[in-house]
Image (cartoon, rainbow, N blue to C red):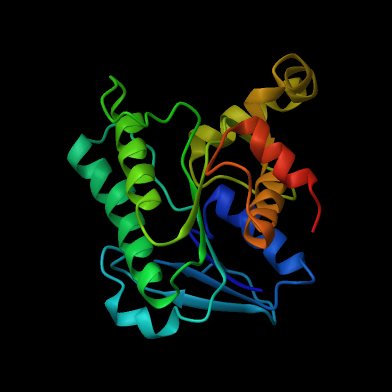
Amino acid sequence: MKVMVFGATGMVGQGVLRECLLADDVEAVAAVGRRGSGQSHPKLTEIVHQDLSDLSAIEDRLGGYDGCFFTLGVSSVGMTETDYERVTYGFTIAAGETLARVNPGMTFVYVSGQGTDSSEKGGAMWARVKGRTENALLRLPLEAYMFRPGIIQPLDGIRSRTALYNALYTVLGPLVPVLRVVAPNQFLTTRQIGQAMLNVARRGYKTRVLEVRDIREAALSGP
């Protein structure tokens, strides 16, 4: 299996990339983004491209892949809906449309978020934009799956590029074992998300929109 990861420098992307490189049945991984992942591995190819709204310049390097794990994203804090949509919707659909053309029918897994608004009409701006993005992906000729994680615990030395998130994880760290028991459908680890994505790419899943419980179930289904 050959896969690509968009956003491999982010917290979720780092976890997904790690699981891809560890998987015996993954023979090649392409990390696509505006900067290199900083990792070196015999399976890994870096594709650095600055304008993620237009992939035409690298389109000839994106063919021949079985799955795409799209983990790229930004926080909506302080952003207008127009600016947030330009990144969240624009970059994602540019990738989806390009890959649907060069790898029709490939598995495309998009990291959305718990609370995403499929109606596109709710009061939360980020949820509307995420919902619009999900709906557009589901209309493309791809095997598209939407992952909606809640709180994500970074493992294996992985850190977020957002200082505020790192501070939050430090504070919550000692409480995580208790919180996972009290509210199991709120928590996932970077390891679980990566394993779930690989398993969905291997054999699909019973629904196209995966909430926390589904992601956990997919992660446990084994290679």
- Rendering coords of residue 57 (x, y %): 29, 81
Q: Nearer the viewer, residue 89 or 164?
A: 89
- Rendering coords of residue 134 (x, y %): 39, 44
Looking at the image, which residue is at 37% across and 28% down?
117
Q: Nearer the viewer, residue 50 or 23?
A: 23
Q: Is 123 above or below relative to 211?
A: above
Looking at the image, which residue is at 38% across and 38% down?
75
Indicate left or right for 89 with 82 as reference: right
- Quadrant location of residue 152? top right
Q: Specify the farthest residue to the bottom.
A: 60
- Where does the N terminus fall, quadrant-wise? bottom right
Q: Is 138 above or below relative to 20?
A: above
Indicate left or right for 122 with 14 as reference: left
Q: Specify the farthest residue to the top.
A: 182
Indicate left or right for 220 with 138 as reference: right
| Residue 103 in sight here | yes
Indicate left or right for 51 with 14 as reference: left
Q: How many marks?
A: 0
- Rendering coords of residue 100 (x, y %): 39, 68
| Residue 77 in sight here | no
Q: Nearer the viewer, residue 123 or 172?
A: 123
- Quadrant location of residue 188? top right
Looking at the image, which residue is at 69% across and 77% down?
41
- Rendering coords of residue 153 (x, y %): 67, 36
- Where does the C terminus fall, quadrant-wise? bottom right
Q: Is 206 above or below relative to 64?
A: above
Looking at the image, which residue is at 56% across and 55% down?
13
